Image: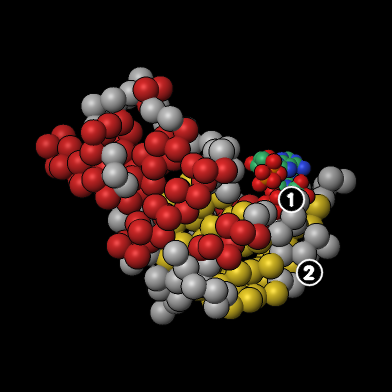
Amino acid sequence: RDAVVCRRVSKVWAAGTARAHEALRDIDLDVAPGEFVVFLGPSGCGKSTLLYLIAGLEPATGGEIWSFHDRIAAPSPERSLIFQETSLFPWLAVWQNVSFGLSLKGVPDGERRSIARAALQRVGLAEAFDKRPDELSGGMRQRVAVARALAMRPKVLLMDEPFAALDVQTRQKMQDFLLDVWRDSGASVLFVTHHIDEAVALADRIVVFTARPGRIKTVVRNDLPRP
Ligand code: ADP
Ligand code: ADP
């Protein structure tokens, strides 16, 4: 079973109203387990929309989306979504942010601490365990967001321009960091960007979105060696 399967997926925002807007039409996409796929294209061409549908945050208006054995109908911790601006809870310590999803599932405190510790180690932020989010840099906060996702053991990591708010140097470091985390986790990654250099640095395959809304996308295999 593939990690993500889209069959003839369509999305019309505000369907049936005067503001109806077709963002996606008849999208077919297969993502293998462990594959790193980048959505590349200009602003407004439906990249985030497709990511939201795969996350289960928005219903498709046509077609079907599957992840492993499940038809996607609602959000799941197996598919963690990370945005450009991470919303960490400022009043909670870093470890509590990282294990927040586990507290919702009723995982006891001691276990949450050890899972958070392991996840923070994997993103190289063990020393931030007891800190507050506002004591960290932007890049570190995005790493905390990745740790929070990893703590839920996702099979698919969905990332919507996660490094767009960072300066160029930090972005480069975050790309290397993400490749390490990805290789280590075995998860599939779907990553949205409008930077060609970022797509080439990260992807196994690049899905090129065109500005014309609703048209089918081209999928390119990326043969350039990664760092
Ligand atoms: P991208 O991520 O490629 O920049 P989006 O998926 O955000 O593109 O947007 C695709 C199109 O759908 C845009 O025209 C955008 O205005 C529209 N859109 C996105 N989200 C909504 C929404 N919640 N309601 C209505 N239209 C939306
Ligand atoms: P991106 O940075 O991916 O291009 P946008 O700035 O287009 O994202 O959208 C930011 C947020 O606003 C998203 O949650 C999106 O769903 C929503 N949005 C975008 N376009 C519209 C729209 N035309 N009507 C309502 N909500 C929208």
For badge 1, the amino acid type reads Ser
Q: Is residue 152 left or right of residue 56?
A: left
Between 196 and 160, the residue placed more toward the observer is 196
Residue at horizontal 58 percent and vertical 78 percent from the top: 221
Q: Is residue 103 visible?
A: no
Farthest residue to the left: give it: 110
* Residue 58 badge: none
Q: Is residue 113 above or below residue 198?
A: above
Front tag of 1 and 2: 1
Picture coordinates of residue 216 (x, y %)? 74, 72
For badge 2, the amino acid type reads Arg
Q: Residues within 10 Å of mark 2 (few under 14, many from 20)?
A: some
Q: Is residue 73 above or below residue 172?
A: below
Question: Quarter of the image containing the C terminus?
Answer: bottom left
Q: Secondary structure at mark 1?
A: loop
Q: Is residue 77 left or right of residue 168?
A: left
Between 7 and 126, the residue placed more toward the observer is 126
Q: Is residue 90 left or right of residue 131?
A: right
Picture coordinates of residue 133 (x, y %)? 38, 26
Picture coordinates of residue 58 (x, y %)? 59, 52
Residue located beneath label 2 in the image = 215
Residue at horizontal 41 percent and vertical 35 percent from the top: 141
Residue at horizontal 39 percent and vertical 46 percent from the top: 146
For marks 1 and 2, the one nearer the N-term is 1
Residue located beneath label 1 in the image = 43
- Asked if the beta carbon under badge 1 is closer than 8 A to the nearest atom of ligand 1, the reply is yes
Q: Is residue 187 above or below residue 29?
A: above
User: How far separated are the C-alphas under marks 1 and 2?
Assistant: 15 Å
